[in-house]
Image (cartoon, rainbow, N blue to C red):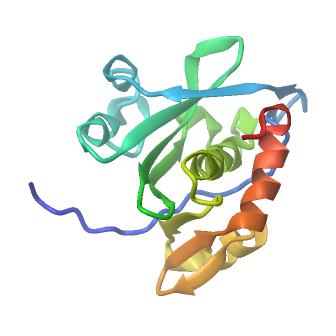
């Protein structure tokens, strides 16, 4: 299998919300995170405005892909994340907001933060103390330090550790703590 070059993630934490928030009305909606399936992948294509090939991501044996949906509307995917549970942390390979949740006219804010909080929650569940890592685009290193409480480990490697992970989890999963 051809090795892909890791160009770094460039997701933007638009706002840390208590769930996801409608950008027009300000209403918040509780979310659910569940496994992404091959049926889901048929809807999440480049043709439909997604940047990544999520179908190929499902074929990576060490990775799990999760979808974020509104609790009472699980047919519309708000965002996706590809995670790998490593020996001592959870690694984020890809993360993406749905096409309608990007840019200035996005429908919902808080999607990326919600997905990162889920990665932190999974890290605790797997006994990794909330530790999460990802490779950042160079220009977003400071953004992740400020918005997620991540720290710059060197190069473009970003780490979210215990305390910052707990803050994110408590923001998004108040009633569900590990």
Identity of the residue drawn at 66% across and 78% down = 151
> Residue 101: which quarter of the image?
top right
Q: Is residue 48 left or right of residue 121?
A: left
Q: Is residue 1 left or right of residue 15?
A: left
Q: Residue furthest right?
A: 26
Identity of the residue drawn at 71% across and 74% down = 145
Q: Is residue 175 left or right of residue 89?
A: right
Q: Position of residue 116 (x, y in %)?
A: 63, 51
| Whether residue 55 can be seen here | yes
Q: Quadrant of the C terminus?
A: top right
Q: Position of residue 106 (x, y in %)?
A: 69, 38
Q: Residue furthest front?
A: 127
Q: Residue furthest bottom?
A: 154
Identity of the residue drawn at 50% across and 49% down = 95
Q: Quadrant of the N terminus?
A: bottom left
Q: Position of residue 39 (x, y in %)?
A: 34, 16
User: Is residue 165 or residue 13 the one in the foreground?
Assistant: 165
134 vs 145: above or below: above
> Residue 87: which quarter of the image?
bottom left
User: Is residue 8 or residue 124 the one in the foreground?
Assistant: 124
Q: How many marks?
A: 0
Q: Position of residue 51 (x, y in %)?
A: 40, 45
75 vs 144: above or below: above
7 vs 92: above or below: below
Q: Is residue 11 left or right of residue 111?
A: left
> Residue 128: which quarter of the image?
bottom right
Identity of the residue drawn at 51% across and 62% down = 89
| Whether residue 148 can be seen here | no
């Amino acid at each position: 299998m051809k090795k892909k070059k890791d160009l770094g993630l460039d997701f933007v934490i638009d706002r840390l919300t208590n769930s996801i928030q409608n950008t027009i009305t300000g209403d918040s909606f509780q979310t659910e995170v569940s496994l992404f399936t091959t049926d889901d992948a048929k809807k999440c294509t480049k043709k439909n405005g997604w940047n990544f090939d999520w179908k190929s991501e499902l074929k990576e044996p060490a990775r799990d892909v999760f979808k974020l949906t509104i609790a009472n509307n699980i047919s519309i995917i708000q965002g996706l994340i590809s995670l790998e549970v490593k020996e001592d942390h959870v690694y984020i390979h890809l993360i993406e907001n749905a096409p309608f949740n990007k840019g200035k006219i996005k429908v919902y804010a808080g999607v990326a933060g919600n997905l990162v909080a889920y990665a932190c929650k999974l890290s605790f569940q797997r006994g990794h103390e909330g530790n999460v890592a990802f490779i950042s685009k160079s220009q977003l290193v400071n953004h992740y330090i400020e918005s997620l409480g991540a720290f710059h480990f060197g190069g473009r490697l970003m780490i979210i550790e215990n305390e910052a992970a707990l803050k994110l989890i408590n923001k998004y999963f108040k009633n569900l703590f590990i």
